Amino acid sequence: MILLHVVAFRLDLNSKQNTPWHALAPQTRLLCVLTSVFAIALTPHGRWWTWAIYAMGVLGVILLSRVTLLTLIKRVAIEFSFLVVILLGTLFRGGGTVLWSWGPLQITTEGLTVLGSVTLKVVLSLCAVNILILTTSIPALLNAFLALRVPSLLVAIMASMYRYTGVLIAEFDTMRQAAMARNLTINNATTRLVIGNAIGALFIRTYERGERIYQAMLARGYQGFPPVEHFPHLRQWDILALTITAIWTIIGQIIYLPR
């Protein structure tokens, strides 16, 4: 039944707000988030104080950017659910003191440390990335990639993925409304039949519509890569934000150096 409630989506729900975070150039926001994600992901296991410092920084950005908290939690929860199986696999890692065992399966102190560490890495990284996506419009984000000298072909692929995902969902929403108007979703049996037929027809319809869109883009001068627009210049606030991010990540790493 979940598939029958898919509607048109929008990634950048909070991109029109007026906050200090939104005042930063898109490439500055992108660099801040990438720096944070790399620092979080490369932190060794068991450094709880480091992740506490990083969590405070992520929470500060959430408050500063005024993102819709419920939307952020829902997106992080959905993305996190796809990684649960992988995370549970780290629980049975060998090493340390055995706390519980059943046949070949063992839960050890090392496994719990790795599980907690990886979970914190995933949650904090997902929060940082989703804040960026929620607060930055897709064209601005693509221009930020171009400003950071990401290959234009790769940026064009990302732009096409976003555009055609919207086309796919729009086509499915049309088919969903048609099925509901004909009362074809009254029970589970007919619902499964409708979904099975819809998935097959969806490929053909989206392929044909995507081809029409591509021909329309070519008629309007599309050359295979996104047009280069004027990139915002880095201002004093952008340099300050990058500096604060660098200091924040370094503090999180050096807190364990004396030990």
Image (tube, helix red, strand yellow):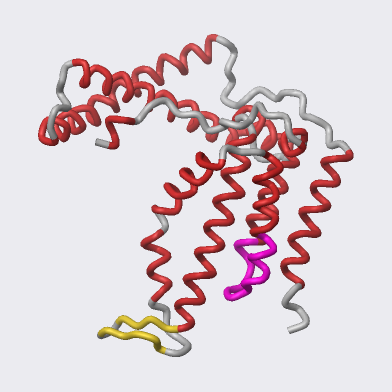
Could you say where residue 156 lies in the image, as x and y percent from the top left?
Answer: 57, 31
Q: Nearer the viewer, residue 103 or 229?
A: 103
Q: Quadrant of residue 191?
A: top left
Residue at image point 24% right, 31% down: 199
Query: Height in image: 215 above or below 35?
Result: above
Query: Height in image: 128 above or below 132?
Result: below
Could you say where residue 24 lies in the image, as x and y percent from the top left?
Answer: 77, 36
The span shown in magenta is: 40-54
In this image, 157 relative to 212: left or right?
right
Q: Is residue 46 magenta?
A: yes
Residue at image point 39% right, 53% down: 82
In this image, 41 relative to 241: left or right?
left
Q: Is residue 254 magenta?
A: no
Could you say where residue 182 lies in the image, as x and y percent from the top left?
Answer: 17, 16
Residue at image point 48% right, 32% down: 161
Query: Height in image: 47 above or below 168?
Result: below
In this image, 193 relative to 217: left or right?
left
In this image, 108 relative to 187: left or right?
right
Q: Nearer the viewer, residue 144 or 223?
A: 144
Could you say where residue 128 lies in the image, as x and y percent from the top left?
Answer: 61, 49
